[in-house]
Image (tube, helix red, strand yellow):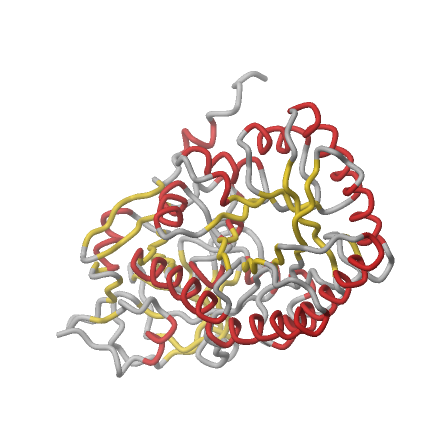
């Protein structure tokens, strides 16, 4: 018999999380202590059914409120071939921001019509790849890209569907490194300066571009559903003004992503339905009020699809006590596989996966192994008494940890496993020292 109600922290683990009588944490029916032993640590474990459930929840919540809606997954949160295949099976689209992410989609034969290419500085080669693959939408971010894409589409002899990324000057109240909808942003055509209108005007004059819609993205993670409504109002008022001046209106509208998830017990996030209600209601209200044709709605969840499904496992090494100051529990990973705490102060819970039933009598700081004082994953958190060899689990690690990982200190990046119904499959093997040297020519 496995336990759940007596361990509050399980609320931020995947829904399948449970603990056996020996105190071992299970995810997807798999013993995490056994997974750590078999595959080594650091190890990223994804509950596959949890990812699928979130895909279906987003599709259901938006489509029942606004039938002409489309959910596309923001690949920057985490992407590999196994996940791309899963998303294809679940009927989602794919938001890519680089040639590498696009190439991953191509490698699993992802339907190109369901792929949207974002990014503020797409290269010529990346745009060529997108055009070669007949991608569904390219989200144009600036005038340089507009001119370059028009030239390349002409060379390819095609008429490429595009969306304009606009900045509505709405503050999402997220960290300054993850706020993107304000005027002073590297992303998009500002509405207030007239540049967004000029972008539409210029695109309409390019025979090989077909403007189909507008897109904004306010930042991430966004805990306030009302900021989406502010973005929708500003963008659709712009659309109405453009229709009056240029005779063009969008038949596709993207409200971006940025949907929050619950990382800690102290800060819950709104349910998917709350975001869907706020966005769909405001879109219907504004199009009706402005006399615009109801466009197809696109939303771009990334973090909200995969974050909670992912759990990072580490092995405890040194435990350092500074009497009257702090106790450090050192693990075999850190900022090389999860830079979010160092980069913008992200907060996590932690649970001793090898003794999850033990009383959390210690207050500790979980430190990584990298040669930086800022390599701290969790500060001043309650934890069971830690000893070398214990397995530690950090939940809600499915988004942005792996994509931003590095080989700092020449440490190989971790393996990734998908679990379901008691079975685990490796979807990315652990890097080796040989992998780190493979690109070097060896000459001096």
Which residue is at a point 36% across and 41% down the rendered structure image? 428
Q: Report x, y in % for residue 265.
A: 44, 79
The residue sitting at the right extreme is: 193
Q: Nearer the viewer, residue 212 or 224?
A: 212
Give the quadrant of the C terminus: top right
Q: Report x, y in % for residue 129.
A: 58, 30
Q: Nearer the viewer, residue 415 or 387?
A: 415
The residue sitting at the top extreme is: 443
Q: In screen coordinates, is 393 left or right of 438? A: left
Q: Report x, y in % for residue 197.
A: 82, 53
Q: Report x, y in % for residue 100.
A: 53, 36
In the rendered view, tell whether residue 32 sits above or below residue 13: above
Which residue is at a point 84% across and 52% down the rendered structure image? 195
Tally of marks: 0
Q: Nearer the viewer, residue 280 or 102?
A: 280
Q: Does residue 247 appear in the picture of this structure?
A: yes
Q: Nearer the viewer, residue 79 or 329?
A: 79
């Amino acid at each position: 018999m496995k336990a759940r109600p007596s361990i509050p922290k399980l609320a931020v683990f995947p829904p399948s999380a449970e603990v056996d009588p020996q105190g071992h944490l299970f995810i997807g029916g798999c013993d995490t202590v056994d997974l750590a032993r078999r595959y080594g640590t650091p190890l990223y474990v994804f509950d596959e059914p949890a990812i699928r459930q979130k895909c279906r929840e987003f599709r259901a919540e938006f489509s029942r409120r606004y039938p002409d809606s489309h959910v596309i997954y923001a690949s920057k949160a985490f992407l590999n071939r196994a996940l791309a295949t899963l998303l294809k099976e679940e009927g989602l689209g794919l938001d890519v921001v680089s040639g590498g992410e696009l190439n991953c989609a191509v490698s699993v034969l992802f339907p190109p019509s369901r792929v949207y290419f974002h990014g503020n500085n797409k290269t010529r080669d990346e745009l060529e790849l997108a055009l070669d693959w007949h991608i569904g939408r390219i989200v144009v971010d600036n005038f340089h890209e507009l001119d370059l894409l028009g030239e390349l589409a002409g060379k390819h002899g095609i008429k490429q569907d595009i969306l304009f990324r606009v900045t509505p000057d709405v503050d999402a109240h997220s960290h300054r490194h993850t706020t993107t909808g304000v005027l002073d942003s590297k992303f998009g055509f500002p509405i207030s300066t007239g540049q967004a209108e000029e972008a539409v005007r210029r695109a309409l004059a390019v025979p090989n571009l077909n403007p189909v819609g507008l897109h904004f993205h306010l930042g991430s993670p966004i805990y306030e559903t009302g900021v989406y409504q502010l973005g929708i109002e500003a963008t659709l008022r712009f659309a109405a003004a453009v229709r009056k001046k240029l005779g063009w209106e969008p038949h596709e509208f993207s409200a971006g992503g940025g949907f929050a998830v619950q990382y800690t017990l102290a800060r819950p996030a709104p349910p998917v339905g709350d975001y869907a209600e706020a966005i769909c209601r405001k879109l219907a209200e504004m199009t009706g009020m402005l006399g615009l044709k109801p466009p197809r709605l696109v939303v771009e969840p990334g973090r909200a699809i995969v974050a909670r499904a992912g759990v990072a496992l580490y092995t405890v090494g040194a435990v350092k006590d500074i009497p009257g100051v702090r106790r450090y529990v050192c693990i075999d990973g850190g900022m090389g596989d999860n830079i979010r705490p160092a980069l913008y102060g992200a907060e996590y819970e932690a649970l001793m996966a090898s003794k999850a039933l033990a009383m959390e009598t210690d207050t500790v700081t979980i430190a990584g192994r990298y040669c930086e004082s800022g390599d701290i994953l969790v500060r001043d958190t309650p934890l069971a008494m830690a000893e070398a060899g214990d397995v530690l689990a950090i939940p809600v690690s499915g988004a942005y940890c792996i994509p931003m990982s590095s080989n700092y200190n020449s440490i190989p990046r971790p393996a990734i496993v998908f679990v379901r119904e008691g079975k685990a499959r490796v979807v990315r093997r652990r890097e080796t020292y040989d992998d780190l040297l493979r690109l070097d020519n060896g000459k001096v």
